[in-house]
Amino acid sequence: MDGHDGEDPKQSTADMTVFVQNLLQQMQTRFQQMSDSIVTKNILDHIYEVLCLLNCCSLDEMGGRINELEQSINDLRAEMGVESSPSPVPPTKPQLDDVKKEEGSA
């Protein structure tokens, strides 16, 4: 009467299972894309903040902000389960004033 009288119930169950699995896979893919997008936006926001500070901060302050940025990125990666990579920024060099003080005291 409803057009499904001739169908095998096992086939209907299998079809529904495949449908639900595909739907869940699509939802998982969308969720991962949204998650990646949010993380990327957060990283870009931190980078933008650092770039804005370049105009008003001393080199020492910039170094501290870069360290904070790296820590934030590592924290975000840890939340995602991604291992952190080594810092691409070499350690800061001593400032010229510090070198002169050391030479004067020697």
Image (tube, rainbow, N blue to C red):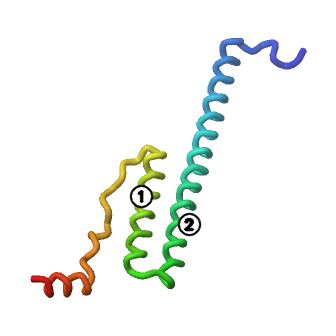
In the rendered image, residue 2, in percent from the top left (x then y), is placed at 88, 18
Neighbourhood count class around disc 1 (C-alpha, 10 Å): few under 14, some 14–19, many 20 upward: some
At label 2, the amino acid type is Asp
Kindly indicate the quadrant of the structure image that contains residue 96.
bottom left
At label 1, the amino acid type is Gln
**Would you place residue 42 above or below residue 4 in this image?**
below
In the rendered image, residue 40, in percent from the top left (x then y), is placed at 53, 59
Residue in front for this viewpoint, 88 or 94 = 94
Name the residue at 81% across, 17% down: 4
- Which-is-in-front pick, marks 2 and 1? 1
| Side of 90 relative to 4 (left or right) | left
Name the residue at 62% across, 34% down: 24
Kindly indicate the quadrant of the structure image that contains residue 38.
bottom right
Residue bearing mark 2? 45
As drawn, the label of residue 71 is 1
Neighbourhood count class around disc 2 (C-alpha, 10 Å): few under 14, some 14–19, many 20 upward: few
Location of the N terminus by quadrant is: top right
| Side of 2 relative to 58 (left or right) | right
- Mark 1 lies on a secondary structure that is helix
**Would you place residue 6 above or below residue 99 in this image?**
above
